[in-house]
Amino acid sequence: MMKIGELAKRSGCSIQTIRFYERKGLLSKPERTQANYRTYDKALLDELIFIKQCRSLDISMKEIETLIHNKNNPEQSCSSVNKLIDEHICQVKEKIKELSSLKLTLEQMAQSCDANKTIKECGILNELSH
């Protein structure tokens, strides 16, 4: 058993993040001591690492909730998990398109600026003003 500070250290999550996941219901409720301190076991550490891994893949809280539900029902078909990940891949592809467009816009703006000009003549600031 460990207290929240130890859980934070072992998981690499902040105490605030752990409490947030608890409030959102993603992380199981920890046991409490007689002094009302939360105590966490290896199973809760594993849950937290799972959530952290999902977040590192930019999986949304709602999607994590679905994945946790699936994980807690191991006899179910994994088709819903595959569908969720396929949808997430589509979202990532769309985000990549948007970021590529943003990059192109910024590169075009950068080309409109000559470091030897004054701020009044700055191409970037002029483009941002329109």
Image (cartoon, rainbow, N blue to C red):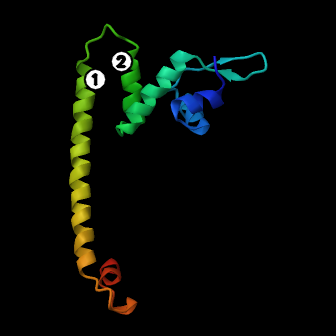
> Can you give x and y, in whole percent of width and height, for residue 22 in the image?
56, 28
User: At 31% from the left edge and 7% from the top edge, which residue is drawn?
Assistant: 75
User: At 23% from the left edge and 24% from the top edge, which residue is drawn?
Assistant: 82
Q: Residues within 10 Å of mark 2 (few under 14, many from 20)?
A: some
Placement of 121 over or under 69, stated as above or below: below
Q: Residues within 10 Å of mark 1 (few under 14, many from 20)?
A: some
Reading the image, the residue beneath label 2 is 70
Placement of 69 over or under 7, stated as above or below: above
* Contact check, label 1 and label 2, Cβ < 8 Å: yes
Does residue 91 appear to the left or right of 15 in the view shown?
Answer: left
Does residue 60 appear to the left or right of 23 in the view shown?
Answer: left
Splitting the image into 4 quarters, where does residue 35 fall?
top right
Reading the image, the residue beneath label 1 is 81
Placement of 90 over or under 53, stated as above or below: below
> Can you give x and y, in whole percent of width and height, for residue 81 in the image?
28, 23
Q: Secondary structure at mark 2?
A: helix
User: At 25% from the left edge and 63% from the top edge, which residue is drawn?
Assistant: 103
Does residue 62 appear to the left or right of 38 in the view shown?
Answer: left
Splitting the image into 4 quarters, where does residue 67 fall?
top left
Mark 1 / mark 2, whichever is N-terminal: 2
The answer to whether residue 62 is visible is: no
> Can you give x and y, in whole percent of width and height, for residue 10 in the image?
55, 29
Q: Secondary structure at mark 1?
A: helix
> Can you give x and y, in whole percent of width and height, for residue 25 in the image?
52, 26
What amino acid is found at the position of numbered circle 1 in the picture? Val
Q: Nearer the viewer, residue 48 or 6?
A: 6
What amino acid is found at the position of numbered circle 2 in the picture? Asn
User: At 41% from the left edge and 14% from the top edge, which residue is drawn?
Assistant: 72
Q: Residue furthest top?
A: 75
Q: Which mark is residue 38?
A: none
